[in-house]
Image: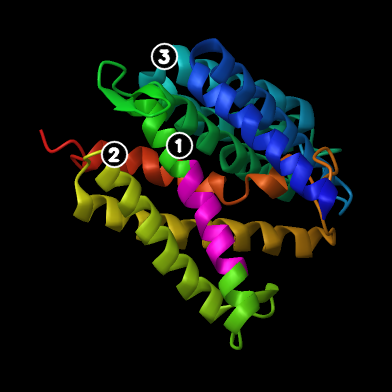
Amino acid sequence: MLVRIITGIIGIAAAAFVIQTGGAVFAGFTLLLMFLAWYEFARAFGERGMGIALFTGFLALGLMWYVSWQKPEFLAMACPLIVLVTLLESVLMRSSTSIMDALASGAGIIYIGFPFTCLLQLREMQPDTVFSTEIGSLTFGCVMVWLMFIGTWASDTFAYFTGTAIGRHKLCPAISPNKTIEGFMGSVIGTTAVVAGLGYYLQLSLPEMAVLGLLIAIFATLGDLVESVAKRYVRIKDSGNIIPGHGGVWDRFDSVLFTAPLVYYFVQFVNLLGK
């Protein structure tokens, strides 16, 4: 437990530095995390006997990252093109790559890569809108990245403590035996309150922020359950051990893989600034 706490503190400090700095530092760490999560994903399914396109995945994720950072208007074209090229491996390399391998590779590349590209674009959003806070001036994109992470962490924290205290009814026993309906409800209520409270402090639209908090709790839970299904299929407990006491990058960002696209598209369609 001590190792887990120390690692968590170091991780939060590192995340704060990267998020606050933004720019090339944030983009570089996004690429690194994307590559590490993909490696863990490919290794996990590889141990199950599937021929995941590891090298092709690295190239595809690098392309998605570059397009998202430099030419975001082409991302919608890059994603389906990457999937089509990945599927072609079942034709060009049919002796070693089955169609199921190619399908798993294509789905995995989008599953890992697209959320991180959303996170990168979210950080760069509306740089001219600045909030004054006790920790300094923050751009709109920086604030939304913080809200996404804080909301995701709050969801996990409230679910754990509520489930531990009063959890009686299993949420998805066949997938994640420790999750309870009471824990999920605690996550929904707590995350909604936290995100709405932060929105009120930042003078953002309170009803919309409450809705965002509710959605973050739901999507964070779904992201966690999706990874649980995958890990049960490949029969592993943790995706890696790169983070002492916390497992792998995929383990730590399983919920973010769902909440990052959610927050990115939410702010695209909802006028949080009320202007």
The residue carrying mark 3 is 71
State left or right for residue 197 relative to residue 152: left
Q: Position of residue 267 (x, y in %)?
A: 29, 39
| Mark 3 surroundings: few (<14), some (14-19) or many (≥20) residues within 10 A | few
Mark 3: secondary structure: loop
Q: Which residues are magenta?
A: 149-160
139 over 111 or under it: above or below: above
Marks 2 and 1 in Cβ contact (< 8 Å): no
Q: Is residue 50 at all visible to an observer of this figure?
A: no
Identify the image quadrant of residue 53.
top right
Identify the image quadrant of residue 194.
bottom left
Mark 2: secondary structure: helix
Mark 2 or mark 1: name the one nearer the start of the chain.
1
Q: Position of residue 190 (x, y in %)?
A: 43, 64
Residue shown at the point (58%, 14%) measured from the top left: 25
The residue carrying mark 1 is 146
Q: Is residue 152 magenta?
A: yes
Marks 1 and 3 in Cβ contact (< 8 Å): no
175 over 247 or under it: above or below: below
The residue carrying mark 2 is 267
Where does the C terminus fall, quadrant-wise? top left
